Image: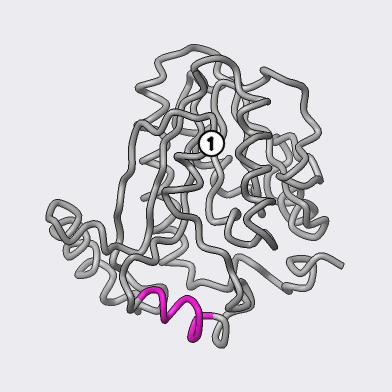
Amino acid sequence: MYRFDTIEDYDREIPHHLMRYYLIKKGNKILIELDFLNKRNMKGIDLGCGTGEHINFLVNRKNDINRIDGVDISIKQINLAKRKYKHINYICGSITDIPIKDDTYNFAYCINAMHHLATKEEQVNVLKEVYRILKKDGIFILHEMNVKNPLIHYYLNYIFPLTKNIDEGKEIWVGKQIIIDSHFELIKIDYFTFTPDFAPKISLKLFQFIDSILEKTIFAKYGAHIMFVLKKL
C-alpha cells in the first residue's frame, strides 16, 4: 500500500487556517505565471494533486483555463478528491511515469510532491516526463521546501516527521542543480513564507505581515518555500 493511502485525513495534517494561507499564497503565485503565459483555453496538470484543493482554487479564479487534470499515486487521496470536487478529471498514477501523451499541456505544476520520491533518479524522471507532456513554450511550476535555512532543514528532517504523518525524515529535498541539469530553461526562482505550520490562528495576521516584509529583503532566500518556474524550449 502506498504510504499516503494510510493517512486518515491529509487535509487535517496541517491546521486549516495555515492550509488556506499556503493554498492562497502558492495558488496566486501560479496564477501570476499563467498570466505571463498569456494563452486562452489553457490545459494544465497538477502532479501529486492530493485532494484537489489547488486545482479547484485555480480553475475558479482564471477564465483562460480550459481544464486542469490531477494525477496522484494514492488511490485514497484520489477518492477523497472525487468526493470533494466531482468536476475535475483525476488520474491515478505515478508522476515518474505519467499516463499522458506527448505535447498535451500548456502548463504543469507540482506542489511539495517531488521530495516524497525515493531517489534522485525518480526526481529526474519526473522532469523528463513533464518536459514530454508539455507543449512547446509550456511552463512547469515546481513548489518545494527550501532547506537553505538550517533551522528549517532541521525542523523538516527531525521534528516535522514526529508531529505529522506527511514526511518520514528521509525526504530528498529538491535543489537548483537538478533543474539546471534538465532540458528545461530555468526562468525564475522565488523564495517565500516564514510562517511556521504550527502558528496559531490568532497570530496569523502578524505572521502574514512578517512574511510581506521579509520576502522583500535579502533574507527571502531563507524562507520555508521555494518556487522554480521552468520553460520547455
Q: Residue furthest front?
A: 181
Q: Which residue is depicted at the point 65% across and 42% down?
A: 126
SS assignment at label 1: loop
Number of numbered markers: 1
Placement of the N terminus among the 4 image quadrants: bottom right
Mark 1: amino acid: Ser
Picture coordinates of residue 65, whole percent (x, y): 53, 23
Q: Is residue 193 above or below residue 169?
A: above
Q: Nearer the viewer, residue 51 or 160?
A: 160
Q: State the residue position of label 1.
A: 182
Residue 91 horizontal/vertical position (percent): 79, 40
Q: Is residue 202 above or below residue 74?
A: below
**Res 116 → quadrant:** bottom right
Main SS category, magenta section: helix
Q: Residue at x 77, y 52 (%)?
A: 73
Residue 131, quarter of picture: top right
> Residue at image x 67%, y 26%?
132
Seen in the picture, residue 177 relative to 173 is either above or below; the reply is above
Q: Is residue 78 left or right of residue 28?
A: right
What x and y, as percent, mark residue 110? Answer: 56, 45
Q: Indicate whether residue 117 is drawn in magenta.
A: no
The segment highlighted magenta reads 152-160
**In this picture, is 33 found above or below 125?**
above
Residue lying at 62% horizontally and 45% vertically, measured from the top left? 124
Q: Furthest residue to the right?
A: 1
Query: Few, some or many C-alpha atoms within 10 Å of disc 1 (few <14, some 14-19, many ≥20)?
Result: some
Q: Is residue 44 left or right of residue 156?
A: right
Q: Position of residue 105 (x, y in %)?
A: 62, 22
Is 158 a magenta residue? yes
